Image: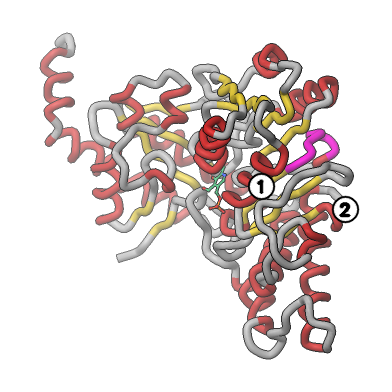
């Protein structure tokens, strides 16, 4: 059976060029980047080269990049690194759990937290950020693009509000990196998180951009790695892989790759809208990352559809992958005011540079057939049909 992967927001495979770049650092050039001998110095040079490659992707100085174990660690470092008991955090109700659950934990530690609402199409209102400011507000954390809907948030406006109020601004750019341009000066952020495995680097590597002069308490203590901002022996192969992936992702922003992915996503959307009744796009009409679409197929269970499609060879996800296994409806769709039944009937398709026209053709065959089959079996759908006015 041909396998089609449309779950790139959950994770992406390594690109062959990324694996090639990493390979020497597992065996021949295995040195510890803190060692002063030659193997160590080779590893150090590779880490510093990767730092430059990642800095180019977000337009910052290499020294402002701190390598971490991924998006979750970067988000936690931003929150717990800046905030102290008595401080106030402004964040949103559609953040990834890496921010949301960290914010909830911060609340247990006597940090005040405001969770901002979003519009029906999944956008945070910068006016709400301004209105939520308090004298003790120390951090605003708002994501750059949402992992479930792809909706891009007005981070530049929020950055201006943060600057005027002299408050630190963190943005989780895990789902933006490699998909849309990122310039930390334009955003006006002090901290920004990226995760390697969302852009064809390995799992377990990421970065936190920390603007020069931004004081924060590290999450981990130990050696003086990463200029005392993140203790622990550097994951040299992972860092090298992330550097290479960042270089490729930067080129993809201008060589037509992202436009090609957007065209595939749009063809998938139009095909499904035309070929399936009672379906639609969550977050439609908003600027979105080019690879993502969140679809609802009313009158069925999204989880059942994910399984049915998987059996036919198509990998997609219901809600966010990190909450799969729990049957709770997505907190993102809930925050957008999507009714529970529709939220549970929603699926995320997320493409990557490896997606092809043939993948979209196959999805346009498989999805309408699977939806029709599940609806035939669905008491929800039968009830809906029985109640529908006769044509
Ligand atoms: C928006 C967002 N932030 C953070 C994370 C966590 O990143 P990691 O898997 O590297 O811990 C994810 C992963 O899905 C994400 O989508």
Query: Considering depth in this image, is 219 or 311 the residue closer to the camera?
Result: 219
What is the span of residues highlighted in magenta in the rendered image?
Answer: 185-191
Does residue 54 appear left or right of residue 342 in this picture? right
Query: Considering depth in this image, is 43 or 21 the residue closer to the camera?
Result: 43
The residue tagged with tag 1: helix, strand or loop? helix
The residue tagged with tag 2: helix, strand or loop? loop
Task: Determine the image quadrant of residue 367.
Answer: top left
Q: Which mark is residue 255?
A: none
Could you tell me which quadrant the N terminus lies in? bottom left
Residue at the top extreme of this rendering: 389
Does residue 76 appear left or right of residue 163 in this picture? left
Please rate how many residues cluster around mark 2, counting C-alpha atoms within 10 Å: few if below 14, some from 14 to 19, many from 20.
some
x and y, in percent, of residue 65 in the image:
78, 55
Write the residue at 28% across / 42% down.
303
Task: Determine the image quadrant of residue 341.
Answer: top left
Q: Nearer the viewer, mark 1 or mark 2?
A: 1
Q: Which residue is mark 1?
A: 77
Write the residue at 76% across / 17% down.
135
x and y, in percent, of residue 7 in the image:
45, 51
Mark yes or no: residue 368 visible: yes
């Amino acid at each position: 059976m041909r396998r089609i992967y449309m779950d790139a927001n959950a994770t992406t495979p390594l690109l062959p060029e990324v694996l090639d770049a990493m390979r020497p650092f597992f065996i021949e050039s295995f040195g510890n980047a803190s060692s002063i001998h030659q193997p160590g110095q080779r590893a150090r040079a590779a880490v510093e080269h990767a730092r430059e490659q990642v800095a180019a992707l977000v337009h910052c100085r290499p020294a402002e990049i701190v390598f971490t174990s991924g998006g979750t660690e970067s988000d936690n470092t931003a929150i717990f690194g800046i905030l102290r008991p008595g401080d106030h955090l402004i964040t949103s109700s559609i953040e990834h759990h890496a921010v949301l659950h960290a914010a909830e934990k911060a609340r247990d530690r006597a940090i005040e937290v405001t969770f901002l609402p979003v519009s029906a199409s999944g956008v945070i209102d910068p006016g709400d950020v301004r209105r939520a400011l308090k004298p003790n507000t120390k951090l605003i954390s708002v994501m750059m693009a949402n992992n479930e809907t792809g909706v891009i948030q007005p981070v530049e406006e929020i950055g201006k509000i943060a600057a005027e109020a002299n408050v630190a601004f963190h943005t989780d750019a895990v789902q933006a990196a490699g998909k849309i341009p990122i310039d930390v000066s334009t955003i006006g952020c002090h901290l920004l998180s990226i995760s390697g495995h969302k852009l064809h680097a390995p799992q377990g590597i990421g970065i936190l951009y920390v603007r020069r002069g931004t004081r924060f308490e590290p999450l981990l203590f130990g050696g003086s790695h990463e200029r005392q901002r993140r203790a622990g022996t550097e994951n040299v192969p992972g860092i090298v892989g992330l550097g290479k992936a960042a270089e490729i992702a930067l080129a993809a922003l201008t060589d037509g790759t992202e436009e090609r992915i957007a065209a595939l996503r749009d063809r998938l959307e139009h095909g499904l809208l035309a070929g399936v009744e009672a379906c639609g796009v969550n977050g439609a009409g908003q600027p979105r990352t080019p690879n993502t679409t969140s679809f609802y197929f009313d009158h069925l269970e999204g989880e059942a559809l994910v399984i049915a499609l998987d059996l036919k060879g198509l990998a997609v996800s219901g809600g966010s992958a990190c909450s799969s296994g729990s049957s709770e409806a997505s907190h993102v769709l809930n925050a957008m005011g999507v009714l529970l039944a529709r939220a549970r009937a929603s699926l995320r398709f997320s493409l990557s540079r490896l997606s092809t026209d043939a993948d979209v053709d196959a999805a346009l065959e498989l999805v309408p057939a699977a939806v029709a089959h599940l609806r035939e079996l669905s008491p929800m759908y039968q009830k809906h049909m029985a109640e529908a006015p006769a044509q």
